[in-house]
Structures are given as C-alpha cells and as structure tokens.
C-alpha cells in the first residue's frame, strides 16, 4: 500500500500533506494531555510493531505482494490519536531510511495508513465489541473484523488517489503524467490484493494479538498476591 514517488502528482502529495498537518497537531495535543511516562514505552512498541509488520510482504494473486499494517490493533490498545503518531513515525522512517514509500508521498501514505485505517478500525471495533467482556470471543472477532475493514478502506483511499491521476494530470496529447491507471483499473487491483489476502492477514494478526493480551492480563491477575487477614 506504500505509494512511491512519481505515482501521484506533487499537488496531490502536497494536498494530502497539508491535510495531515492539523491531524498531527491535534494528535500531538491529545498526547500531551493524556500521555503518562508509563505509556511512552507502549507508544515506542506500537511504532516498532507497525514498522516490523509492514516489512513482511505476502504474495497475492496478481503477481505482486501486500502486507498488514497493524493500525487497528494499535488504535484499540492505545487509542486512535496515539495510533496516528506511532504509525506516522514508522512510515516516515520506512520512507527515509528504507525507501519503502516515497518521500514526497509521505502525506498520502500517512493519510491512508496512519489516519484513515486507525480511525476506521477503532470505531468499527467499538461498534461491534460494545458491552463485550474483555477477552471474549466477540471482542476478539470484533478486532479481526475491524482490522479487515480498516485496511481495505485504506486501500480504497490509495486506489482513488492513484485512479484520479489520469483524470487530472495529462500531457496535451492525453498521455498520463503520473499513475497511468484510471479508477476502473486502480480500484479493483488494490482491493483484490487486500480483500483476498492482506485483509485476512491483518485480521488474524489483530485477533491473535488481542487474544495474547487478554491471556497475559488474566495471568497477571491470577498471579497477583492476595491480601488477607492473618490468622
């Protein structure tokens, strides 16, 4: 889902970067008000988790690869605004250090994966898991479904950004200046990869992580020393 440089026009990249500025500003302000020292390692772990999981690419039917992003899991655990920051950090490092995603396209990639995906996943999860017991099957399934939906909505956003390029930016003879594939090609191509493979990987990873966290939390409660009256 990482968009490389050259596929989106500079104006498209700039527009999405400008859209992300108030998002980052608001997310930073939210963190200043709610961030405790004990949560800083969780933020760092969230960024590392997102960074690592995006490095594992899975083959898909059309001959390319796709990957999970971890956005919904981070949003569930830390909140969507914290997910904006952690995902953005991971995506910026990937672009600058590893060339995974373009430098000019950072605004577009963070819009799709660090803004759209966390918020979609978080609120879908909240809706499905309402009143569910912690660690229950419904809560775990809610995480899986939310993650599946979120990554596909993010992929849809990316495909639209690709698909509008030939409509807006062409040479005088009609030759596309940037992405040559219109919406009729870009949308099915992106969604095929994520509906059939990446979405399931994202859902499975999210469900497994939530189950693991629930088990660890239960074990911690059981192992707590009980305080009682001495005989």
Image (cartoon, helix red, strand yellow):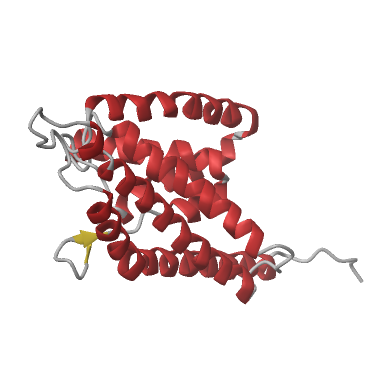
Residue at image x 64%, y 28%? 33
- Is 68 left, or right, of 227 in this rendering? left
Work out whether residue 160 or residue 74 is closer to the camera in this orientation and state it: 160
Residue 61, position in %: x, y? 20, 71
Residue 111, position in %: x, y? 40, 38
Counting the numbered discs, the total is 0
On-image quarter of the C terminus: bottom right
Residue 229, position in %: x, y? 90, 66
Determine which quarter of the picture holds residue 8: top left
Q: Residue furthest front?
A: 173
Residue at image x 89%, y 67%? 230
Work out whether residue 154 or residue 166 is closer to the camera in this orientation and state it: 166
Q: Residue furthest bottom?
A: 137
- Is 21 left, or right, of 26 in this rendering? left
Determine which quarter of the picture holds residue 172: top left
Residue at image x 55%, y 71%? 141
Work out whether residue 36 or residue 86 is closer to the camera in this orientation and state it: 86
Residue 151, position in %: x, y? 41, 56
Determine which quarter of the picture holds residue 196: bottom left
Residue at image x 39%, y 45%? 113
Work out whether residue 62 or residue 219 is closer to the camera in this orientation and state it: 62
Figure check: 156 above or below 146: above
């Amino acid at each position: 889902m990482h968009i490389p440089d050259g596929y989106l026009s500079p104006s498209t990249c700039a527009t999405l970067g400008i859209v992300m500025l108030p998002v980052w500003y608001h997310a930073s302000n939210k963190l200043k008000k709610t961030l405790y020292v004990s949560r800083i390692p969780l933020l760092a772990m969230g960024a590392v988790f997102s960074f690592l999981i995006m490095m594992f690419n899975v083959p898909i039917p059309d001959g390319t690869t796709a990957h999970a992003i971890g956005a919904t899991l981070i949003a569930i655990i830390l909140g969507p605004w914290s997910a904006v920051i952690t995902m953005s950090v991971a995506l910026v490092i990937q672009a600058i250090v590893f060339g995974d995603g373009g430098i000019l396209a950072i605004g577009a990639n963070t819009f799709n994966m660090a803004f759209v995906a966390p918020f979609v996943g978080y609120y879908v999860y909240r809706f499905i898991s309402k009143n569910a017991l912690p660690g229950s099957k419904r809560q775990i399934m809610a995480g899986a479904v939310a993650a599946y939906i979120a990554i596909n909505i993010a992929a849809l956003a990316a495909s639209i950004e690709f698909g509008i390029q030939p409509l807006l930016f062409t040479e005088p003879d009609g030759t596309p200046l940037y992405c040559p594939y219109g919406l009729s090609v870009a949308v099915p191509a992106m969604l095929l990869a994520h509906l059939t493979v990446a979405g399931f990987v994202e859902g499975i990873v999210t469900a497994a992580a939530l189950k693991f966290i629930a088990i660890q939390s239960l074990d911690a409660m059981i192992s707590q020393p009980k305080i009682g009256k001495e005989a």
